Image (cartoon, grey):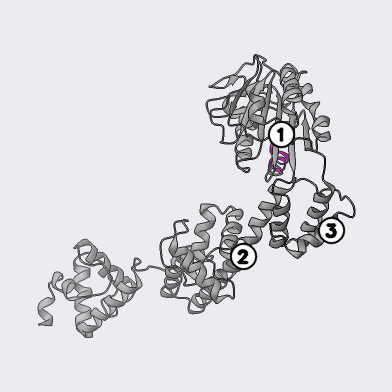
């Protein structure tokens, strides 16, 4: 077995004395117990579940407890508590009190819960389904257990809400055990918190009166007790200090089944990942929503890097656009964005939007504001542009800039003299399309009349004359 010089150096140093092992990545427990109720009978047995807090703390869990929470906890504190569970290596969620369920979810009622219809319990109950979803996002091998101590109290429910606990969908990797609080607390203490006993093995022995379901992890909630190897612990401490791929590889060569082997492999995987994989992982960790992705595509389009549809789906076209933008802004062109890059991209798009708006304001014409809206249909100043167009008076219905340019060229090619222009206006007026004064000057009102006439006669509606429009006006012979 080849071990590098750095490993022998670290190993030799570690043998001089035992070093305390580094703290475990977080093993977390969240306990929510409601013993007292303002509008229902109390649930005194819920206290037996809350009493497990000290035991879990002794076993190294980071424990958070909510006792007799009121509905206001749902507005601020509950979200923070749930967010703190993310990234746990092991997770135990203990709930106790009055529990109700519907066909979609289950809730632990807060102290001041009152109504028991689906709307009321959603506003004054802690969603067990939401907690299960959060737990389901942990590493697939992480031991995760949700224990529900149901008071079994008969409540006056309504509109599809029923007493007791039931949850239609349990995310993969999450195990659930439920039953009376006191029996549940005893089972957790005596069977689940046993060092080295896997969660799956323990739940096979679920006693009568309790029910278990879901997909329990083959790993234990409590690691098997083992005497710390002072040499290994010393090497591990120094490996972490060096924090290089070589150091972690050497640790694993010497202690492939060591106490920190799993952590070493995870860190080694991070250190060895390619820049592309790292960029992809970091963007995924941002958790961009579909709406946020659409905003990014819109910014790229404003800046001229993206020409496809704004759909919030990052396909090859979007990735290429991102990479081009990154390259031109001195970033590694990975095609994946960081939070700082998204901020810069948004600022650049806003600056271009603002510059176009300032140019439109300087010209202050309908055409200028239309040009702005064509480039920035959802721009920062789009509402102001539309309002200003309205203030400037009647306007020709919008057509694409390309069509407008073609229509202008066709009308110019006709070479219409002033008498002919007056004749066009006379005919439009006679046919009920008001062109304004019959003076041979084609203003906005004349253009609108031509547009409306073309549209009424199934002609290409542009507001500009062409041979087909003159023929329909019975003026085509004049051009021959």
According to the image, label 1 marks what residue? 221
Residue at 86% over, 58% down: 13
Q: Secondary structure at mark 2?
A: helix
Q: Is residue 186 left or right of residue 365?
A: right
Q: Secondary structure at mark 3?
A: helix
Q: Can you give x and y, in whole percent of width and height, for residue 198 in the image?
A: 67, 31
According to the image, label 3 marks what residue? 12
Q: Residue furthest front?
A: 1
Region in magenta:
74-82
Residue 319 in view in this figure: yes
Image vertical order of residue 8 relative to residue 126, above or below: below
Q: Can you give x and y, in whole percent of width and height, for residue 254 in the image?
A: 73, 53
3 vs 1, front mark: 3
1 vs 2, front mark: 1
According to the image, label 2 marks what residue? 343
Residue at 84% over, 58% down: 12
Asked if the stretch drawn in magenta spans residue 319, the answer is no
Asked if the stretch drawn in magenta spans residue 79, the answer is yes
Along the line of sight, which residue is nearer the eye, 42 or 315? 315
């Amino acid at each position: 077995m080849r071990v590098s010089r750095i490993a022998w150096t670290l190993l030799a140093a570690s043998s001089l004395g035992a070093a305390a092992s580094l703290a475990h990545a977080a093993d977390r427990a969240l306990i929510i117990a409601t013993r007292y109720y303002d509008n229902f009978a109390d649930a005194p047995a819920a206290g037996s579940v809350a009493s497990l807090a000290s035991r879990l703390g002794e076993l190294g869990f980071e424990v958070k407890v909510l006792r007799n929470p009121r509905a206001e906890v749902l507005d601020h504190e509950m979200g923070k508590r749930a967010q703190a569970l993310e990234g746990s290596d092991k997770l135990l969620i203990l709930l106790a009190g009055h529990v109700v369920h519907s066909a979609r979810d289950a809730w632990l009622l807060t102290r001041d819960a009152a109504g028991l219809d689906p709307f009321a319990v959603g506003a004054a109950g802690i969603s067990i389904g939401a907690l299960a979803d959060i737990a389901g996002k942990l590493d697939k091998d992480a031991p995760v257990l949700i224990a529900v101590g149901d008071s079994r109290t008969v409540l006056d429910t309504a509109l599809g809400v029923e007493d007791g606990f039931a949850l239609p969908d349990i995310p993969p990797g999450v195990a659930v055990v439920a039953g009376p609080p006191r029996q549940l607390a005893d089972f957790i203490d005596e069977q689940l918190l046993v060092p080295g006993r896997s969660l799956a093995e323990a739940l096979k022995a679920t006693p009568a009166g309790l029910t278990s379901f879901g997909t329990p992890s083959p790993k234990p909630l409590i690691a098997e007790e083992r005497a710390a190897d002072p040499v290994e612990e010393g090497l591990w401490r120094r490996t972490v200090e060096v924090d290089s791929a070589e150091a972690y590889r050497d640790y694993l060569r010497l202690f492939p089944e060591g106490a920190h082997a799993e952590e070493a492999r995870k860190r080694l995987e991070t250190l060895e990942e390619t820049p592309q994989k790292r960029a992809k992982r970091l963007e995924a960790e941002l958790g961009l929503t579909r709406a946020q992705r659409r905003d990014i595509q819109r910014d790229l389009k404003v800046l001229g890097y993206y020409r496809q549809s704004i759909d919030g789906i990052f396909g090859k076209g979007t990735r290429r656009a991102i990479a081009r933008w990154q390259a031109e802004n001195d970033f590694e062109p990975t095609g994946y964005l960081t939070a700082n890059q998204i901020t810069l991209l948004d600022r650049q798009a806003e600056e271009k939007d603002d510059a176009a708006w300032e140019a439109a304001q300087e010209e202050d014409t309908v055409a200028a504001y239309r040009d702005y809206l064509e480039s920035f249909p959802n721009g920062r100043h789009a509402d102001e542009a539309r309002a200003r167009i309205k203030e400037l008076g009647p306007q020709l219905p919008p057509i694409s800039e390309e069509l407008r340019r073609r229509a202008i060229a066709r009308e110019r090619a006709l070479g219409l003299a002033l008498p002919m222009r007056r004749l066009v206006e006379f005919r439009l007026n006679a046919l009920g399309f008001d062109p304004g004064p019959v003076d041979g000057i084609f203003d906005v009102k004349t253009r609108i009349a031509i547009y409306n006439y073309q549209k009424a006669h199934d002609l290409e509606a542009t507001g500009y004359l062409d041979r087909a429009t003159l023929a329909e006006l019975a003026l085509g012979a004049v051009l021959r």
